[in-house]
Image: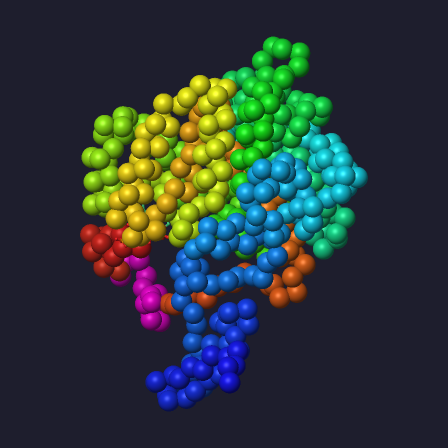
Amino acid sequence: MSKDTLTITDNRTGKQYEIPIEHNAIRTADLRQIKTSVEDAGLVGYDPALTNTATCKSKITCIVGDKGILRYRGYPIEELAEKSNYLETAYLIVKGELPDRKHFEMWKQNVTIHSMVHENIKKFVDEFRYDAHPMGILVGTVGALSTFYPDAKDIFDLESRRLQTRRLIGKLPTLAAFAYRHSRGLPYVYPDNDLSYTGNFLSMLFKMTELKYQPNPVLERALDVLFILHADHEQNCSTNALRSVASSQVDAYSAVAAAVAALYGPLHGGANEAVIRMLMEIGSVKRIPEYIKKFKSGEGRLMGFGHRVYKNYDPRAKIIKRVADEVFQVTGRNPLIDIALELERIALEDDYFVSRKLYPNVDFYSGIIYQAMGFPVTMFPVLFAIPRTSGWMAQWAELVRDPEQKITRPRQIYIGEGARSYVPIAQRPQPDMREDAVSESI
Ligand SMILES: CC(C)(COP(=O)(O)OP(=O)(O)OC[C@H]1O[C@@H](n2cnc3c(N)ncnc32)[C@H](O)[C@@H]1OP(=O)(O)O)[C@@H](O)C(=O)NCCC(=O)NCCS
């Protein structure tokens, strides 16, 4: 008869342990009972990048990597990208269900009225260097919001959590646009609440002297679809950073600032920028075979290919490819697309990529679209952070309400020196010997 347990034999002691299995997982805390002696602290799981460790139970986003499935609250990403809009998807992610008409209107209104930021934030942005990276500005300004809303410390109050969620989703485009305008030396554009979420964002970015900015409806919709695709992606690096920081019960602005910081890194939010740089370096379709050869020999990677979770295809990449066609009808064709298409065609026929299950990911085409729409590469991770805010806030609320969660505090395997006595500086080894010893640890 089958049992939902795991039997472990410790060959060091010959003892057997029976550990429960729930949701196809064991609790690594159950390993602690496996000891060789009373002094032994017990067995731990060693998983440096948490590649096979679940840190929470979640109802928000489901990914089935080997089938190329991504669903928010049960709804397939393909359907949402085709039929929904970003604000409705954000409602779904944050609240768990699609809204009825009345609740959607209320939600839209409640998010939109929070699009303004305190005037002091403007001064704050002003003080960054003229060439400051917009992600650096975003980390700073999102964190600074916590000083404007001390009420956000009340994280166990439902109404406060709702308010911070609406504020953050409402304000992120404004902070992002201010960061962009600052880097261009352009005056800030205040929100236009008559426009849609993405229409207003485009206005705050690109409005010049016209009295009212009219977003191109195709580009407005394309950005909206890209926002839907980026709204959540379960326990990725920035969400894990957010959960870890939020587990200390800090306010949501500080936790989201930590998430934005994680997204700033080239392995996370910066991959689409790396794709653009790679495509520009390749420069022409003729040079693709030469580069494919390099990637296969381990000299660099084919950026925008491969994924830690998706081992069949990234469902977002398919949708983005379609969006690219629509955008190019308006902006004209980004010449890099021809290189990208040919790279994809060759890679998908090549045994190296096929056998390693390396397929285009979301970043392979998104950068080409953003570039065609007029965004500088430094804005790419910012365009990721804006929609991901709804995912972060949903994950944050889930964490705060989860009775099983505590302050995050992983274990380590200590491999350093044993106990030793302090030696006064005058009695320590010669300088050149010490330099050798120290250089190993930095
Ligand atoms: C996304 C990524 C980090 C996933 O990495 P991972 O799941 O840890 O996979 P690994 O790094 O273990 O790679 C497995 C194998 O595929 C190869 N590989 C993975 N991605 C590759 C790529 N983009 N180009 C060439 N080879 C690649 C590795 O060299 C390795 O080969 P080996 O088994 O012969 O050593 C990785 O595929 C990558 O670096 N892709 C490019 C960057 C990118 O697009 N990032 C955005 C992700 S959304």
Q: Is residue 309 above or below residue 332?
A: below
Residue 419 is one of the magenta-drawn residues: yes
Residue pictured at 65% horizontal, 61% vertical: 402
Q: Residue furthest right?
A: 102
Residue pictured at 67% horizontal, 40% vertical: 88
Q: Is residue 168 left or right of residue 360?
A: right
Give the x, y percent position of residue 288. Answer: 25, 33
Q: Is residue 310 left or right of residue 433?
A: right
User: Residue 437, can we see it?
Assistant: yes
Q: Is residue 114 above or below residue 32?
A: above
User: Residue 380, can we see it?
Assistant: no
Q: Is residue 43 above or below residue 351?
A: below
Residue pictured at 20% horizontal, 35% vertical: 290
Q: Based on the displayed image, in which of its 4 quarters is residue 118 positioned?
A: top right
Give the x, y percent position of residue 204. Answer: 60, 23
Residue in the foreground of this view, choosing between 230 and 244: 230
Q: Is residue 352 left or right of residue 19?
A: left
Q: Which residues are magenta?
A: 415-427
Residue 55 is one of the magenta-drawn residues: no
